């Protein structure tokens, strides 16, 4: 089992790649005026709902954040802010889904609100991960002992992706593969329709 922080870091890299895809698709629409690929955007929003919201964030809070709170109070303000951000994640995704639906039904007149919301969501999410990496992970490196890391490794190993079957790749990997299948180059592999 890899180090718990390495596992979280890897998950952050996957989430960052999906955020980049989301931002890229919106930016390309602004640049070219071509219709947004709603299938690819829906796959991205589904990934953000299923993997970070149902797997990644609960694991951070249940294991790493809780362990840090037991060991020290120096990161409590940041941990409180991150917990609040986690709690708002599902609502932010629902809002993006509604804005995408409005774009699909209302056309270009609805793009401005969607584009602005995507920009705000991606910027906020990147800032969220920065706080976890630059504050929480740094504090964890300083205050957690080898026994703490051993316990976290055991908890990590017992925490199986609830959406993947035994021996199967994680749902996050499956959803990223679906995004790559649906998105146009350079984000994905889909050929022109």
Image (spheres, grey):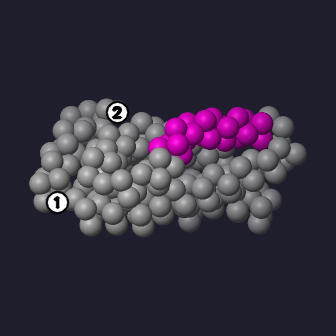
Residue to which mark 1 is pinned? 145
Instruction: Report how many numbered discs are placed on residues in the image.
Output: 2
Residue 97 lies in magenta, yes or no? yes
Q: Which residue shows up at 67% across the image and 38% down it?
A: 95
Q: Which residue shows up at 31% across the image and 32% down it?
A: 162
- Ranked by sequence position, the earlier of labels 2 and 1 is 1
Residue to which mark 2 is pinned? 163
**To which quarter of the image does residue 88 belong?**
top right
Q: Which residue shows up at 52% across the image and 38% down it?
A: 87
Residue furthest toward the right?
109
User: Residue 119, percent across and down?
Assistant: 68, 57
Which sits in the foreground, 45 or 129? Answer: 129
- When the figure is inspected, residue 91 is found, relative to residue 25, above or below; the finding is above
User: Residue 66, percent across and down?
Assistant: 31, 44
Is residue 46 at least partly visible in the picture?
no
Which residues make up the magenta segment? 82-103
Residue 44 disc label: none
- When the figure is inspected, residue 80 is found, relative to residue 159, above or below; the finding is below
């Amino acid at each position: 089992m890899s180090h718990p922080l390495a596992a979280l870091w890897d998950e952050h890299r996957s989430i960052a790649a999906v955020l980049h895809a989301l931002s890229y698709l919106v930016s390309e629409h602004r640049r070219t005026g071509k219709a947004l690929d709603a299938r690819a955007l829906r796959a991205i929003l589904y990934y953000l709902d299923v993997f970070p919201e149902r797997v990644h964030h609960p694991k951070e809070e249940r294991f790493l954040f809780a362990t840090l709170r037991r060991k020290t109070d120096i990161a409590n303000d940041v941990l409180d802010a991150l917990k609040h951000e986690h709690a708002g994640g599902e609502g932010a995704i629902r809002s993006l889904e509604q804005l995408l639906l409005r774009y699909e039904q209302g056309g270009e007149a609805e793009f401005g609100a969607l584009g602005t919301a995507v920009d705000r969501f991606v910027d906020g999410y990147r800032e969220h991960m920065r706080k976890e990496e630059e504050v929480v992970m740094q504090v964890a490196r300083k205050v957690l002992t080898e026994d703490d890391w051993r316990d976290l490794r055991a908890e990590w190993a017992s925490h199986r992706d609830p959406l993947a079957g035994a021996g199967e790749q994680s749902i996050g990997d499956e959803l990223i593969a679906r995004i790559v299948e649906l998105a146009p180059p350079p984000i994905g592999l889909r050929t022109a329709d």
